[in-house]
């Protein structure tokens, strides 16, 4: 299953960009990133079947193990692509939110978009590591 991070805003050269690059290189699953301008832009056509996850401060909070289980289930069900969408500063509209397969939050606090991208990259790496039985992750 391909992991696809779609983010509004440019990360450019920043400490967050270095973190994102570090974790994205470690992920052994196919993974791509698409950056869009704050408004507009064209999202590449998805592979089908696809699951869409919107990163949202009001979204469901899950443990790393639960996140890994979800990705593993989607993979095993034949989902070809999981899309993780990070919105612009105002977040996602109600139409986008209602179409998503999952609203995912990293806690009730508001996080900067660039930091959310780094946190997502780390959690994608951690989830795929858990599924591979990698000894790094400390699961209960």
Image (cartoon, helix red, strand yellow):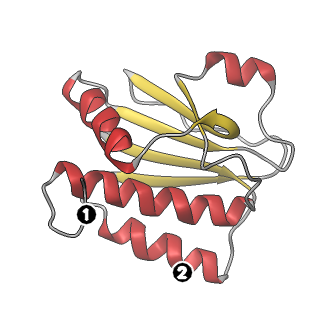
Badge 2 crowding class, 10 Å Cα cut-off, few under 14, some 14 to 19, many 20 or more, is some
Work out whether 81 lies above or below 133. above
Badge 1 crowding class, 10 Å Cα cut-off, few under 14, some 14 to 19, many 20 or more, is few
Q: Which residue is mark 2?
A: 18
Q: Which tag, 2 or 1, sits closer to the chain's start?
A: 2
Instruction: Write down the quadrant of residue 113 in the picture.
Output: bottom right
Q: Which mark is residue 47?
A: none
Q: Report, in whole angstroms, how far the alpha carbon at label 2 lies from the one at label 1.
A: 24 Å
Give the residue drawn at x 54%, y 80%: 18
Q: Which residue occupies the foreground of this view, 63 or 125?
A: 63
Q: Are marks 2 and 1 in contact (CB under 8 Å)?
A: no
Q: Is residue 84 left or right of residue 74?
A: right
Residue 115 in percent (x, y) is at 65, 66
Q: Is residue 15 left or right of residue 78?
A: right
Quarter of the image containing the N terminus? top left
Q: Nearer the viewer, mark 2 or mark 1?
A: 1
Q: Is residue 39 visible?
A: yes
Task: Spot the residue most to the front.
Answer: 140
Q: Is residue 34 left or right of residue 140?
A: right
Question: Could you tell me how many numbered marks the image carries?
Answer: 2
Work out whether 87 lies above or below 27. above
Q: Which mark is residue 138?
A: 1
Q: Which residue occupies the foreground of this view, 140 or 113?
A: 140
Residue 17 in percent (x, y) is at 59, 75
Give the residue drawn at x 45%, y 26%: 51
Q: Is residue 29 visible?
A: no
Q: Is residue 114 left or right of residue 24?
A: right
Give the residue drawn at x 39%, y 54%: 124
Give the residue drawn at x 38%, y 23%: 48
Q: Secondary structure at mark 1?
A: loop
Q: Secondary structure at mark 2?
A: helix
Work out whether 79 lies above or below 137. above
């Amino acid at each position: 299953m391909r992991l696809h991070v779609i983010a509004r805003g440019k990360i450019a050269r920043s400490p967050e960009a270095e973190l994102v690059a570090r974790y994205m290189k470690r992920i052994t699953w196919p993974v791509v990133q698409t950056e869009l301008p704050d408004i507009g832009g064209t999202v590449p056509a998805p592979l089908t079947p696809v699951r869409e996850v919107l990163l949202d401060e009001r979204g469901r909070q899950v443990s790393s193990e639960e996140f890994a289980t979800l990705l593993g289930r989607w993979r095993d069900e034949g989902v070809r692509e999981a899309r993780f969408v990070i919105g612009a500063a105002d977040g996602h509209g109600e139409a986008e939110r209602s179409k998503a397969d999952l609203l995912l939050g990293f806690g009730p606090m508001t996080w900067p978009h660039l930091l959310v991208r780094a946190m997502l990259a780390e959690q994608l790496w951690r989830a795929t590591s858990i599924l591979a039985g990698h000894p790094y992750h400390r699961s209960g």
